[in-house]
Image: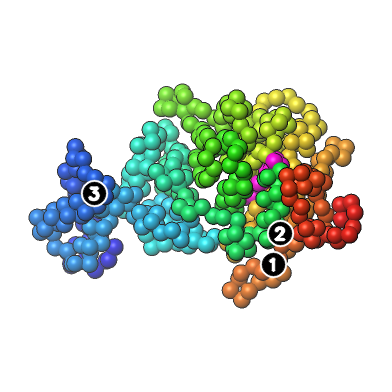
Amino acid sequence: MNNTLPPRLTPNDIIRFKKYLIDVVSRSLEGNEIPAAEKKNVVRERLNALIEQSRFPLPAEVRRDLVEAALNDIVGYGPIQPLLEDDTISEIMVNGPKKVYIERKGMLQRTNIAFDDDEHVIRIIERIVLPLGRRIDAEYPMVDARLPDGSRVNAVIPPVAIDGPSLTIRKFRKDKLRIEQLIQFGSLSEGMAKFLRACVAARLNIIISGGTGSGKTTLLNVLSSFIPENERIVTIEDAAELQLQQEHVVRLESRPPDLNGRGAVTIRDLVRNALRMRPDRIVVGECRGGEALDMLQAMNTGHDGSMTTVHANSPRDALARLETLVLMAGMDLPLKVVRQQIASAVDLIIQQSRLRDGSRKIVSITEIVGMEGDVISMSELFKFEQTGLTPDGKILGVHKATGLRPMFYSRLEAVGFKLDARIFGANPAAGGRK
């Protein structure tokens, strides 16, 4: 907001006047059914009329900014509304009222946007969560929610958030990315794309591994688009983000407990229920608990072609993460048995990473070969090799095949994919795996 104010007016005066405008106009809207398409114009007219009646001495530029700020508070999500409308922004992070950051093209930037105070941030958080039947207060200071457009929201308030209320919004892409776009972005090579398409068609069980914000869900969306139209797909998520275009899709979403601590539906509950729904494919947005055991058992008992994501920084770490998640199921299983379950269930681990320059790439595609003693054996098929940096800090590199052909290659051929041996960096005349 412009700081050029008449001599006796302070920024606090403007904040108090804005709260007065919001209060009066909000009350005037109660009980009035105004069509959504007209609401903004109606609110703007009432704000301007109220300012005229109040004779509050405001310069034209300050008045315009004040009206827009009040408008966003009444019909939107306050100061962050313009950020939500900006399609180039992928994430919004509010660290208290005066520190608002965004992620754009994989890079963090601080904005000049600010809330009035802690109470203002909490008011916007409540605007998001209350219509969803969620609660946030001193007793329940953390909440996960979802905006109407599908964007994921996490909010934390004092006393847990020491420096003031925090709000994080992972924005939902309106346009669904295709594999061709990922190739253009340099996320993977054309050969890797052909290989992954074949793997999905051949009903391989695939784990996408990566850190927070590395693009796991985006890649899961793209791979899911390769599932044939004639298959029944059940998707299971904490917050529905997958955008499958197939006709026969059943979407399930977990539910937290209500205000009385009852009615929770976990991802594990949904995975177990999905097995009774005659699925051809089960796609779990993310395994983060005991549902990993149910998922592995499903993969091992005829539900081929299942896919999920896990938080891990390498394919080997992903296996260790899966072991930990299986043990969280509460079953007293020997570690070797757990590893045998993983080795027989999982065919492929795709490692996704966000690099230092903000770009997101597949950095490894690894086949699970089997067990060697007590250890799961793996074989890397594709990898990303960094070759340098541009003057402006962009990472240069190339996706390379390792020269190994996967052990499951015959499964790809069985569904009609006869991939050129050169995709794997292999000599076409050579036998075996090379």
Disc 1 element: strand
Residue 328 seen from this side: no
Among the 4 quarters of the image, the one containing residue 292: top right
Residue 388 seen from this side: yes
Mark 3 crowd level (few <14, some 14–19, many ≥20, 10 Å Cα): some
Q: Is residue 48 magenta?
A: no
Disc 3 element: helix
Among numbered discs 1 and 3, the one appearing first in the sequence = 3
The magenta span reads 203-212
Amino acid marked by disc 2: Gly
Q: What residue lies at 49% left-to-right and 61% top-to-bottom?
A: 104
Mark 1 — residue? 397
Mark 1 crowd level (few <14, some 14–19, many ≥20, 10 Å Cα): few
Give the left or right position of residue 434, taking residue 260 as reference. Answer: right
Tell me the distance, in whole angstroms, between the alpha carbons under discs 1 and 2: 16 Å
Tell me the distance, in whole angstroms, between the alpha carbons under discs 3 and 2: 51 Å
